[in-house]
Amino acid sequence: MITPRFEVRQDEANVYVTIYAPHVRAQSIEFDVDVDQLKFFASPYYLRITFPGKVVESEESSAKYDAALGEILVTLSKQTPGEEFANLDLLTSLLATRREKNIASYSEGSELRGPVIEEIGDTNSYSNADAGFNNDVDIDAALEQAYTNEDFDWEIPQNPLNVETEALLVGTAKYGFDGQYSGYLMHVHTTANEINEVADPENMTSEARHRGRIACEDEKFDIEYYIDNYINDEDIQPLIQHISRFNYALCRRKKDQDDEIADVPAVTADLLTQQFQKTQITVDQHIASESDDSCVKFTDAEKKQMMSLPRKTHLVSNKMSVYLGLVDILFAYLFELRTNIGELNVESTWAIGAVSSTLSNLEQFSTLRSTAVACYRRGLAYPLYRNWELCEKTFKDVCAVCRLGCRAILKIFLELKQIFDEHDIYYIYSKLYFDDYCIWLQTSASGKIIQSLARKLHRLEIDKDEVGWNLDEYEDLALITSDDDDDDDDENADNEMPTQAADIQSLNQQETGVSTEADAPTSQQPLIQIIGNSSDNMEGSDSLEDKPTGSLRLSTNATSERSHGKKPLIEILE
């Protein structure tokens, strides 16, 4: 059977479902409304939607079929008018069965461990007794109590892996989302996979992969490259000042809701817009054209992606690792987005994979601080621009995305899934991570934990000493060296100025043929010579007219004498 494409919207009294099922006969269409489910059948299509609340058939309920468009509009009444049905745009969660919804809710607050369940047949029959749940226990209330804002402990006890246990694990390495996969990277070294840095993914334990990652980062880090980006940061500063669409959306939300958001400057969106116009700060291209909720509103293409996802229920055993892996992948994506001024390019797939420890080294983090340190280390060792302030700005972007909630994160992971799916080699990471993350974010991820994570990220501070590369010492040395070079350049410039001035003056003299009195040698033959005795000179003295310096004119008598063949009193010497 084919699951048709559909959309769901609501108002205070009704729920509207638009089903796209072209080329079906109206006589073959069947509907069934059962408490919180709508079932649709018209060969070859079958659709079962489980709503967050209860619906009923009433006089206002209807179903209309537009054969030209191939659309069926179903109108159902809410059992409780005015009730708000949440998450109607998360289509994968609407496709889940009642059993899957309950198991997903229960597993979020428990320590159960079980395999991922993928639905391969109809599981309509269901009872609470079969599921093994105690009807006297309000699971949702228990979860609400367990995961209130600050109650989630982001630190876990450290249990070092002993040698015997590690030896037993060799050959059974697990990786991917929640450590659920193996065998997918068996032949990774025979492909051109430039993201993977794990020497033997199928046999190395998580601790061995961690040690390998540290070694690769230490080898890759180039202190000269880093110092060059530190001193010559003209190209990096615009990237740091760039305001992403996520920060812009968060600022707009702050204005609309008038809530306190610590990691966004306290300016209104109008003032922020004026700042964009007055300065050269760049902003994502599509911010001006899209609405303020573009970061959380799904497009038709994204809805189609969610429809194509496999149907699974995740019983996550290591929730800490899953949430921290989310932070690591978000950092890699947002770093690439910032360095490209809000757009991705053909190299972005590799760049994101290289910066992410989760993708490149199959890392499974245990603490938030270790996750942040790994992000900084890879942000300073692998990208084109390697700058500490740029990493700090990217972490603020991660915090902003987490504050926007699960929908904003889901949109990012849908985009990541698309670009990795389209790559001939790196598509494997969609299978290992992005497919499961896209499903988990719709069905099991806790919005309260995401908000708690955002607050932890906002308060988290990483020192340069924690990355282990003595960055402060190299920066101080670079600044001292730079100041000495500037002083030497100034001194050389002062010494060269007289020499340069003399050279310029000499060049001008050669071009014009004029020599100054100071430069003329004393032995040089004069340009003007008086001919005759002194009496002649005295007699002809009145024939010389006083002229300004540098000019001399012969009298009329002297000119007439020369015209009769007599030697003139003044002769110009060549």
Image (tube, rainbow, N blue to C red):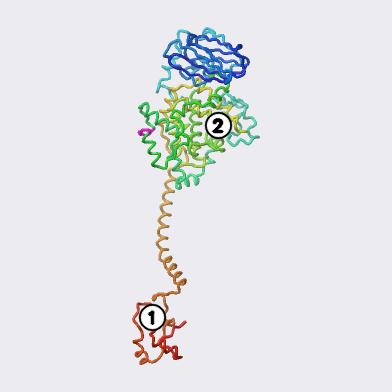
**How far across and down, in percent of the image, does residue 496 sit?**
42, 63
> Visible in this render: residue 311?
no
Residue 267 is inside the magenta segment: yes
Report x, y in % for residue 120.
61, 16
Q: Which mark is residue 359?
A: 2
* Sequence-first disc among 2 and 1: 2
Of 289 and 198, nearer the camera is: 289
Left-right relation of 124 to 402: right
Q: Tag count in the figure?
A: 2
Q: Looking at numbered disc 1 in the image, what kind of residue is underneath it?
A: Leu
Instruction: Say above or below: 110 vs 471.
Output: above
Q: Which mark is residue 43?
A: none
Magenta span: chief secondary structure: loop
Residue 19, given in percent of the width and then of the height, sits at: 55, 18
Q: Amino acid at mark 2?
A: Leu
- Rendered residue at 40%/61% (across/down): 494
Position of residue 179 measured from the top left corner of the image (x, y, whole percent): 56, 25
Q: Nearer the viewer, mark 2 or mark 1?
A: 1
Helix, strand or loop for disc 1: loop
Mark 1 crowdedness (10 Å alpha carbons): few <14, some 14-19, many ≥20? few
Residue designated by label 1? 552
Kindly check if marks 2 and 1 are in contact, taking CB atoms under 8 A apart as contact: no
Specify the quadrant that holds the N terminus: top right
Q: Secondary structure at mark 2?
A: helix
Estimate how packed mark 2 is, as few (under 14), some (14 to 19) or many (20 or more) residues with alpha carbons within 10 Å: many
Q: Is residue 245 magenta?
A: no
Residue 35 visible in the displayed image? yes
Magenta segment, which residues? 264-269
Vertical side of 393 occupied by 547: above or below: below
From the viewer's side, name the closer residue of 478 and 564.
564
